Amino acid sequence: MDHSGALELFAGKFNVQQGVAFTFFIGSMAMMAATAFFWLSMREVGERWRTSMLVSGLITFIAAVHYFYMRDFYLAHKLSPTFFRYVDWLLTVPLMCVEFYLITKKAGAKIELLWKLIAASVAMLVLGYIGEGIYRDEAVSWVWGFLSSLPYFYILYLVWSGEVAALAAQAGPLVQKANRVLAWFVLVGWAIYPIGYILGTKGGLFGMDLGTDAGFMDLVYNIGDAINKIGFGLVIYALARSEDSAESSKA
């Protein structure tokens, strides 16, 4: 890495660029620490929860590695690492959707549900990248943003009132509660991404150019990524520990 770029960036008064660079560093450290926690916690949870904890650690590990690359790119070029960010999301977001399948598997979730979630998340990201990475500076970017929102709303439907929600209710109150918390992450936590898309692309809001300098959105993305990805894993961990404790008390 070219450390002269980092020194130049951090010289003088604190600004948005410094804040973004700092959150790339903190984000990578936080997600690597979360990875260690999730994988070490596999020894503390019941066997049926170990795959979920493994996936939680994979999500944060992949994100941590990508954050090192994104930080270096940002410091070297002073540009948003859009390509690297979408590569990260293309790997981690489907894995986050896999967690919904894993926690409802006991209630009879079928492999078809898993593929629905994965297909919707991949479609959401590929369509979003076309608009933000390829047609970013063209008024047509809003079309790709709109198309990207369709699979996102489909995921929302599945986890709030569709198949995932129904299976979670059958799996018991603990799984139902965990599913609802994860659903809130999808509804509220993931909302930063379409906001960033609208602000970061020309004509992102139905063809209207907001004229907004969206450089600060990297700051929001970094914070949101850490909260969403680490938060997903913590919800799974809390569910595993709660259900294991409930089963132990019955024994």
Image: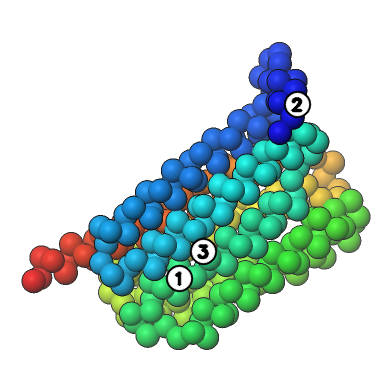
Q: Earlier in the sequence, mark 2 or mark 1?
A: 2
Q: Point out residue 31 in the picture as x, y percentages from the top left corner.
A: 49, 46
- Find numbered disc 2 in the image and state the secondary structure of the residue it sits on: helix
Quickly name the residue at label 2: 5
- Report the residue at 32% width, 59% height from top: 42
User: Which of the 4 quarters of the picture holds residue 251?
Assistant: bottom left
Q: Which mark is residue 96?
A: 3
| Residue type beneath disc 2 | Gly
Label 1 crowd (10 A; few <14 / some 14-19 / many >=20)? many
Please state which of residues 206 and 108 is positioned toward the viewer in this rendering.
108
Find the distance from the CA under tag 2 to the CA under tag 1: 42 Å
Find the distance from the CA under tag 2 to the CA under tag 3: 34 Å
The answer to whether residue 203 is visible is no
Q: Is residue 177 above or below residue 69?
A: below
Label 2 crowd (10 A; few <14 / some 14-19 / many >=20)? some
Quickly name the residue at label 1: 100
Task: Tell whether 148 sits left or right of 27.
Answer: right
Q: Is residue 16 above or below residue 224?
A: above
Seen as rendered, the residue at the extreme top is 12
Q: Point out residue 195 in the picture as x, y percentages from the top left corner.
A: 68, 50
User: Which of the 4 quarters of the picture holds residue 177?
Assistant: bottom left
